[in-house]
Amino acid sequence: MIVDKLLSLVFVFLIALVDGRPLVRHIRSSHEFDRLLQKHAKDTGLPVIVDFYSDGCGPCRMMAPIFKKLAKEIGQDKAVFVKVDTNAQHELSSKYQIRSLPTFVFFLNGKKVNQFSGAGEQQLRQMTNSVVRDSEIQNTKLTLESLTAYYQEVDPSKSTTDVQSVFQKCASMMGAGDECVGAAANQLARRLKQKYNQAPKSEERFSAEARAPGSDGNKDNSSSESKKSRGGSSNKPNLHLATKEQLMQELEARLDAERDQEVEEEEDDEDEAMHSYMPSEFPEKVVIVGGGPAGMSAAIYAARANLRPVVICPPMGGQLQGKGVDVENYPGLHNMTGPGVVAAMRQQAAEFGAVFESDMVESINASTRPMKVITANSSTVIETHSVIIASGAESNWLDIPGEYEMRGNGVSSCATCDGAIFRGKDVVVVGGGDSAMEEALVLARTSKAVTLIHRRDSFRASNILSQRVLDHPVITVKWNTVVLEVLGEAVEQEGDNVNLDEQVKEVKAVMVKNVETNEVSEIPTKALFVAIGHTPTTDFLKGVVEFDSQHPGYISTVARSTHTSVPGVFAAGDVSDAVYRQAITSAGSGAAAALDAERYLSENNLGNEAAELEAELMAEIMGDEPNEEITYNAYSDVGGRGAGVKESMSTEL
């Protein structure tokens, strides 16, 4: 029965021909990833650069277009770029000890050579260029024939056995079977040059054709070998005579081939490029800073008013981006998480004509007109007549020993981003508001146990979220307790580029104190999630606008509007709302800011440079024509038969 089922499966799956590879490949299984590493270690010698990410991780989405852009710049003949979703591939995340997102891991010859975590574009570029350079240097091979000819020239006393011994030592260093390749071949060549003042002749291990994305390589070896092992024809294998093991091997080979075909048919998503900001000859009408509900709502309203807003923000932004539970308090939304809501808002804004610059704002110069917005990473200067500030807020931290040192190795402020990494483990959450409740509920889905620490004897969160936390069997609450210190343990570092001077630690426990009894104790845990509120992201506006004296960090607005102390600068969302701080109130203030900006532009006759230039050009064109009145004589179009026509028409009239 089992054999019959296997036979039916084998006949269903056909071997697909691989014509190339996508710019960025998405891994769907651990087996696929292992096969990819093995293929490029043996067939191409290309480095494999892996982005471990999560859809709910804001920094991951910020780095996604950068990763794709870098893949285009480097080229498919220099490196292989792949992405691994940690929420779907728990085995790979555990195998490579992914503790923070995004994490970028670099492989060469099937081995991990480097790794770093965080949204560091410069670091990503440096490590990528380094591994590509190492790959090119190691793309060399010394053959036994060339080594024999070399010794006959420089040291004829060496016997054939001696030469073969040297060659085998080189081959064993790289574990490449009977080949002296890569770093071992380079090292041998250098030593021989030092000894004999000349190096043996080497050749490329992998040709340019083999490293090109359209090359066949040895992708069908496993299939052909399975056919040969059965002793049947390569074109028509006698599957009825095959063993169960041979059938499984054939099925696996054909499934792999089918997956390769699916990968090649994957199309790169160009939506981001379609809606990317391109500098204009004229100042922009409105620039929106921020990508959360306030910024997206402002973008939708401004775009519908034909203001062509430029939105400066990471690819997916806002506190809502880190909300892993369903958004239940936004009318009309059902069974949608925070990232889903933000993605829908962004798509809607783009469809109406908003364009996006994937960056952060470093400063705004409002002393000149038009104003100048300077971005942080690219240092782009965007001139604009109006600015809507909707940059939201960023997480607060405890500022306790061990917290900063272990960020990315167990300390986090985003359960949606990093929670899946600690599947089946004990975790701790600190806080008592809605954010802390949501973090605890998200972690309770995957963690073995969740301990929620709060410094008071009651939550300040909404009743419905508080009750869900209290009723959850996985969550334990520790009242009247504060965290004093994050305790860690050393982590064994892997790879070729290990920094021996810097000891990396990961979380093993937190030291806490009961504020009523002053009792100090330790809680063993693998992760600490801090959810103690947020601070408005407004540092780049110091000295530009006035702030609320009663609420530090919040922008002061005029009366019941979104106007700030500077004409043409408007504030929306959490940067100016110290009371409600909800997604829906942020969206409402974003719409109001767009309306205020539109009214400001109209009243001051701003943003019409293109139309005015067109009118001037038309006036110049018309000015070049003769001053005589321009009329149309229909009688001249009758082909020379105009005589008498006018008179006859007059008669008829």
Image (spheres, rainbow, N blue to C red):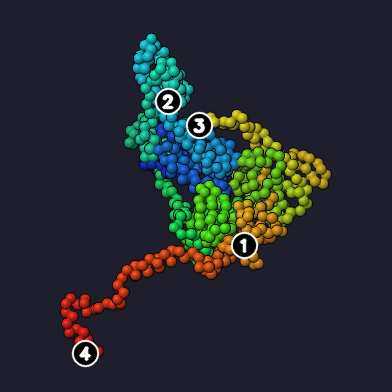
Query: Depth check: 595 or 527 in front?
Result: 595
Which quadrant of the structure image shows residue 199?
A: top left
Mark 1 to mark 4: distance in Å? 74 Å
Q: Which three-letter amino acid code belongs to the residue tagged 2? A: Val
Place residue 248 in its image quadrant: top left
Please give the name of the residue rendered at 50% of the width and 51% of the height, measured from the top-left corner: 380
Earlier along the polypeptide chain: callout 1 or callout 2?
A: 2
Circle nearer the N terminus (3, 4)? 3
Mark 2 closeness class: few <14, some 14–19, many ≥20 residues within 10 Å: many
Q: Which residue is mark 4?
A: 651
Q: Earlier in the sequence, mark 1 or mark 3?
A: 3
| Residue identifier under label 3 | 111
For marks 1 and 4 on the same chain, the one whose residue lies earlier in the sequence:
1
Tags 3 and 4 touching, CB below 8 Å: no
Residue at image point 64% right, 41% down: 407
For disc 3, the neighbor class at 10 Å (few under 14, some 14 to 19, many from 20) is: some
The residue drawn where x is 81% and y is 41% is: 519
